[in-house]
Amino acid sequence: MSRLDDTGAFLPFAKKHLVAGRENGDLSTNLKELWPEPDWQVLCDEGMPVDVCAHLAVYYSGWRNHPRPSQPSVTSEQWLEAFVQSVAVLKELYDDVADMADVKRLPDLFKSRMGVPKTKGKQHIRDVYPLYAIGRGENRTYKTPFALTLRQSALIKLLPDIGWPYTVSPNQVSLFPVSFNDGYYSLCTIQGRRYFLKDSEEFPNRFQSEYDAIEALCEHMKLDRSPYVPRKKIEGIRNVKLGYDVTPKQFIHTFKFRGVQFGNSMPDRERQLFLNNSYYAFKVLAHLLNIPDSWIGLGGQLGIAFGARGQGGASAHYEPDLNIINLTRRSGPGSISHEWFHAVDALLARTRGFEGRLVSELLPEMNLKDAPDKYRENINLLTGIVTKQLSPSTKYYKRSQNLASQKGVKKYWIDSGEMLARAFESFIQDTMSQKEIVCDWLVMGTQLNDEPEEHQDKNPYPQGDERKHLNHSMAKLMQGMWGK
């Protein structure tokens, strides 16, 4: 297999360009600027196990925010270089984590990627300093990125049991369940390397089980531990078998994308998997909409990135300011129709001079004076969908509101642009079913029974008669935009 590299126009601001930018002096040496803290809730929403996410979050919280100062054996320039390298390496390693087995491999992988040779016996800091450039510790105390304090170890164990990341920030947790020699559990504070029993009149600090202690802690902190967030089940996704491998040039030529971009950490086999499945998905989309394949790239303006534009844990997304779809390694499959509709939404705004915006953000106040008749018709139809078929009185909105109103859950679910994109997903999945076409990478998981029965009141897609009416409106909108 030949190497698959970025092809077409340069798609700026990918995370891999950050390190390269240092040569030009435009890279900050602040951790939060080099790599803003990942959105742990988004990672969990995408299906990452909460215990895995807790490990990553606690590790990240323990890192230095700035490089170390100069020391007798290591200069400030050496610490700076190693700090920047550590951030780049850790970011890529985080992108590859899917389960606890991956978490356990992180220390060895980090050591290997940092170029520190394996040797036996004690080593001088000047020979191994890259391993300690981002870890905590002052003066001559050195810690790797994966060294944990007692409190951090306790947090990793506790956070999944108290509803994190939806209910509480780790820095709000001050009590931890501890088992003593008598077999009972008590809630304790942590100071340094020791536990201290919590004296409390609120509860008898002696519990028969860890579960009882955690229940008391949640009641004490007034935590709701059970927000429900829908997740696409990509573990069983069906990959397409084309019988040949698509090249980036072929992808661009077929759909007229302006560029294709890959994340540095994505191996060639995975690049090919994303390229082949996305190629087939866009082929299916063009067929369903009855448009030429070359129209999918929206006039050669749309770019696509595979695992290249996250922040060590961002979800699949569309960037309206740069007109780029990014499919992440965890949430790309099943998201193509959703993100493509966002690009269409932005195209409608851009046509009237609103760069970097979505037309769904501008409705219904958008001024259509002097707009071409075809454009006015499409915007009026879209306005009708938003104001009537997505209104708070609809069952679709109410189920989305049930999701968004949970403590710790984002208002994303009732954003009009997101509701439109989910309605488009439903339209595409139903159209595929009618034509007996299967393409999980294009869309999946929009049916009512895709949610557990006890959570179907929070299904985030239109259902029943509302779905049928929205399908009709989406078909009319697509025909109005692409019809000859």
Image: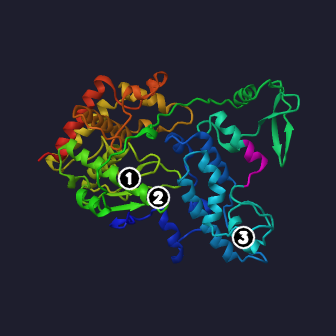
Cβ–Cβ under 8 Å for marks 2 and 1: yes
Residue in the image at 84% along x and 34% along y: 198
Q: Who comes first in sequence, dot 2 or dot 1?
A: 2
Residue 164 place in picture, x, y as percent: 62, 38
Residue linked to disc 3: 128
Residue linked to disc 2: 266
Residues drawn in magenta = 147-154
Examine the residues drawn in magenta and state their main secondary structure: helix
Question: How much space separates mark 1 and mark 3, taking CA atoms?
Answer: 38 Å
Instruction: Assign a secondary structure to mark 3.
Output: helix
Q: Quadrant of the N terminus?
A: bottom left
Residue linked to disc 1: 274
* Count of marks overlaid on the render: 3
Residue 407 place in picture, x, y as percent: 56, 33
Question: Can residue 235 be spotted in the picture?
Answer: yes
Q: Amino acid at mark 2?
A: Met
Cβ–Cβ under 8 Å for marks 2 and 3: no
Instruction: Assign a secondary structure to mark 2.
Output: loop
Residue in the image at 30% along x and 40% along y: 364
Residue 225 place in picture, x, y as percent: 62, 30
Q: Nearer the viewer, residue 222 or 103?
A: 103
User: Which numbered marker is on residue 75?
Assistant: none
Q: Who comes first in sequence, dot 2 or dot 3?
A: 3
Residue 133 lies in what quarter of the image? bottom right
